[in-house]
Image (spheres, grey):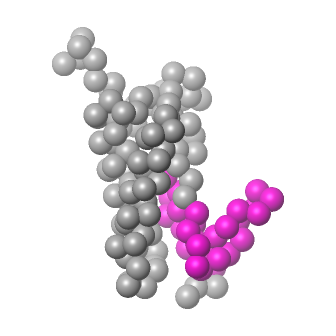
Amino acid sequence: MSDTILKCTTRHVRIFTAVVENNDLILDNGHLTLDIDPDNEFSWSDQSIKKVQDYFRELVELQADNELSDYTLRKIGSLLEDFIRKLLKDGELSYNPNSRVMNYSMGLPRTQELL
């Protein structure tokens, strides 16, 4: 295992081999911490957060027999990004109108006027 924190950072997902203590990341190779949408670009329901967390657990379990590496974390992060995009496309997630920046990073909202 690594002596440094492994991490994956995508636009909407951050994964660390660490635990959070007093707002600090503390190395823990036996634990993965997931930070979903740190910029609050989306409006999340409890159900949509749970879906992402459940999918994260599923992806981690699928990798249980493999060595934890930067590549593995990036793969999990990329799959979570795709999953979030699917939630947005399916209408289970929406852009946060109070977000600091409205950049529609996963595409324009799907409205009747735009279809």
Pick the quarter of the image with the N terminus: bottom right
Instruction: Name the residue nearer the viewer: 54 or 101.
Output: 54
Image vertical order of residue 115 relative to residue 66, above or below = above
Q: Residue 66, located in which quarter of the rendered image?
A: bottom left
Q: Is residue 16 in view from this perspective?
A: yes
Which residue is the extreme one toward the bottom? 1
**Whole-percent x, y for residue 60 in the image:** 42, 70
Q: Residue at x 42, y 56 (%)?
A: 54
Whether 16 is among the magenta residues is yes
Which residue is the extreme one toward the left? 115
Instruction: Name the residue nearer the viewer: 62 or 106.
Output: 62
Q: Residue at x 28, y 23 (%)?
A: 110
Q: Residue at x 30, y 42 (%)?
A: 86
In the picture provided, is 37 more to the left or to the right than 115?
right
Image vertical order of residue 17 relative to residue 21, above or below = below
Q: Residue 47, located in which quarter of the rendered image?
A: top left
Instruction: Name the residue nearer the viewer: 1 or 47.
Output: 47
**What stretch of residues is rendered in magenta?**
4-33
Q: Is residue 11 in view from this perspective?
A: no
Pick the quarter of the image with the C terminus: top left
Task: Give the total of numbered labels.
Answer: 0
